[in-house]
Image (cartoon, rainbow, N blue to C red):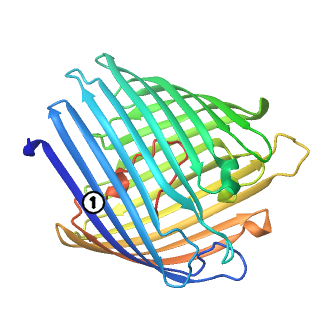
Amino acid sequence: MAENIKLSPEVILREVYSDNIYLVDDEKTDDYITSVLPNMGMQIAFTPRSRVELLYLGRFDIYNTADNFRQDHHYGHLNFQLDTPKGSSVNLGAWGEDSANQPDSTEDRSKDYSIHALYADVDLMVFSATELFGTYQRSSRRFDDTIDRDDDFDRDFFAIGLVNSQSSLFPLLLEYRYETQENDQPATGSTDFVYQAAYTGFKWRQDQRLSGSLRVGYLWSEFNSASAYDGWVTDTDLKYALSDFTRITGTAYRGVRESTRSARDTLDYYIYAGGKLSIAYSRLDPFRFRIYGRYENKDYRLTEASVDSREDDLYSAGVSAQYNIEDWLSISLGYLYRMNDSSVETQKYKENRVFAELIVLSNGNMRHKRLPRSIDQIDYFKP
């Protein structure tokens, strides 16, 4: 039985300096943050075509001076996978997160929450070049403090689609999504947010030089049964091997989401649109380099068109260098710049971060294996 079990441990020791830990425009506070990130993955193969995968990712922070940030963050994922000889598969799983939205000042507090989710994915190869897929997920978020419970939600997400790969150059993708979110708000009453979207595009296999998916489509949404945003959307995630040593990863997204006030959101909902680009270079192995950037626009709105809206432009850019001392040991240095240019003066900020990491026992960056199972484009536990 031991040969059917695969363990993937990883421990990261990180030191970060930030010149603006509260992400504010005035009266900035700098600090040093020491973090330990224990990560563990395990696969158990029952048969050549069935297995269980478990994943735990943690982060424990110690701030040199600040004392109102949450110090421990946890993410877990359990997945059962069953494949067939013809390429069909079934995935059943659960994931959860125990974390917090950060405080906004020295007088503020951490907004602790937990998320629990169950999901099911089905992929059916109905013909040699045609794949049908479907997914359903039920997720719930709960905040610890009563004052934050307006942001509690129950969310149901459903998607169905097909991929026709008769043309390997342009494998056609068609997809339909439906999602509903209910927030039980003690102060103002319950709210509900519903959207449906239809996509078309292409989806390339992971073993190709160009892999991932390109989706564009149209979305209809409602907030409390009143018309919200109707318009074009995209959910694109592509990887391209420019050479044996250079890989480019890009994402583009546009969608709509109900506001989370404990995360500094305002008004009823917002339209988010943006993208990320990352270039990884490994020709000088054991030295590896990565350059990355991100832009996101958030257009906050009320269902009452007469009320002024809020708009944020978020920018970030960074660079990192990693040296692999041994197969099980590496060090990494990096710099990250973030800025939010908001039409609301109190929401503006700029931040510079410098960080160093010691990575032990890693057979690959396990943080990239995280499965948030969400279209929110959330980057859990990123520095």
Q: Residue, x 71% and y 76% (percent of image)?
A: 25
Q: Residue, x 57% and y 46% (percent of image)?
A: 141
Seen as rendered, the residue at the extreme right is 306
Q: Secondary structure at mark 1?
A: loop
Q: Residue, x 73% and y 66% (percent of image)?
A: 347
Residue 197 coordinates in the image, percent (x, y): 61, 29
Q: Residues within 10 Å of mark 1 (few under 14, many from 20)?
A: few
Report the number of numbered marks. Answer: 1
Establish if 200 lies above or below 340: above
Q: Which residue is at the front of the view, 99 or 372?
A: 99
Amino acid type shown at disc 1: Phe
Q: Which residue is at the front of the view, 188 or 224?
A: 188
Establish if 172 lies above or below 312: above
Q: Is residue 166 visible?
A: no
Residue 268 coordinates in the image, percent (x, y): 76, 45
Residue 61 coordinates in the image, percent (x, y): 44, 72
User: 223 left or right of 334?
Assistant: right
Q: Is residue 127 visible?
A: yes
User: 90 left or right of 62?
Assistant: left
Q: Which residue is at the front of the view, 322 or 241?
A: 322
Q: Which residue is at the front of the view, 204 or 61?
A: 61
Q: Quadrant of the N terminus?
A: top left
User: 61 left or right of 309?
Assistant: left
Seen as rendered, the residue at the extreme top is 127
- The quarter holding residue 204 reads top left
Residue 31 coordinates in the image, percent (x, y): 54, 83
Disc 1 marks which residue? 245
Establish if 219 lies above or below 287: above
Q: Residue, x 67% and y 54% (percent of image)?
A: 146
